[in-house]
Amino acid sequence: MTKATTTTAPRRARGEYAKTKERREAILDAALEVFAEGGYRAGSLREVAQRVSMSEAGLLHHFPNKVALLQAVLDRRDEMSRRLVPIEGDDGAALLRGLVRLAAHNASVPGVVELFCTLSAEATSPDHPAHSYFVRRYDYTRHNITRAFTSLAAKDHVAPGMSPERAAITLIAMMDGLQVQWLLDRDVVDMAETLQRLIASFVDIDWDVEDPPARTEERK
C-alpha cells in the first residue's frame, strides 16, 4: 500500500508580509504629508502615490479609496497617542502626565500636528468624511479625561470650583490651542512645559513619577 501524500498551499513568505507592511507605512507617511500641506480635500491619491513612487492603482490595492486612507492615517496617530497616554486607565495623575508626554512627542512630528489641526477644523462640516470620527474622538477623550479628574477630585487634588467636566473641557481646549500657537511660532511656545504649568494651576499631582508604558489593545 502506498502512503498517502498531502499537499498544503504554499505559505506567503514572511518577507512579502514585511514588504507589504513597509509599503503601507510609507503610503501613510506620504498621505500625512500631502493632507497636512494642502488639507484633505485638496490632497489627491495621485500625489500620495507619486511620493512613494507607485501608481494610483497600486495605492488602491492597499487602500480602496481616499476615505479609507484618511481613516488609516487617523488610526495610526491614535495608536501612537495610546502608547503614551493611559487614556482608559484608572490613575488620573498618570493620564495627565501622559498628556504632557504626548505634547512633547508632538513637537517632534509637526506634520502630524498640522494634519490634526487642519482636519479637526475642516471636519466641523457635517459632510466632511472625518466629521463622525472627530465627534466620536472628542466624546471619547472628554469622557476619559472627565473620569480622570473625577478620581482626582475625590482625593481633593482638583481646585475648588472646578468640576471634572469643566476641567476636561478646559484641558482639551488648552491642548488644541497650544498646538495652533506652536504651529504658528515654534520658537515662542513650548507645548509640553506650558501644558504642564497650565494643568498644575488647577490640579495638584506629583509630576516626578515615572509611569509604566501605557497598555494598548488592538481596536477593530
Image: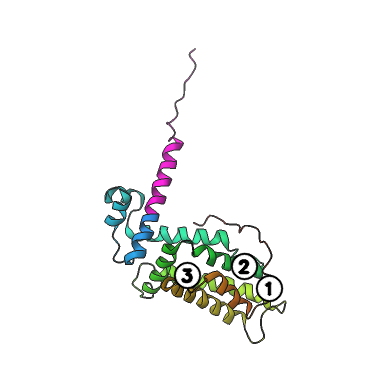
Q: Which residue is mark 3?
A: 136
Residue neighbourhood size for the residue with mark 2, other residues' Cα within 10 Å, grouped as few (<14), some (14–19), many (≥20):
many
Q: Nearer the viewer, residue 9 or 138?
A: 138
Q: Which residues are magenta?
A: 1-28
At numbered mark 3, what does the secondary structure look like: helix, strand or loop? helix
Q: Is residue 176 visible?
A: yes
Amino acid type of the residue tagged 3 in the rendering: Arg
Q: Earlier in the sequence, mark 3 or mark 1?
A: 3
Q: Which residue is mark 1?
A: 205
Left/right placement of residue 188 relative to residue 156 reads left
User: Residue 132: percent from the left, percent from the top?
Assistant: 41, 69
Q: Which residue is mark 2?
A: 97
Q: Nearer the viewer, residue 215 or 191?
A: 191
Amino acid type of the residue tagged 2 in the rendering: Arg
Image quadrant where residue 48 sits = bottom left
Amino acid type of the residue tagged 1 in the rendering: Ile
At numbered mark 1, what does the secondary structure look like: helix, strand or loop? loop
Left/right placement of residue 19 relative to residue 140 reads left
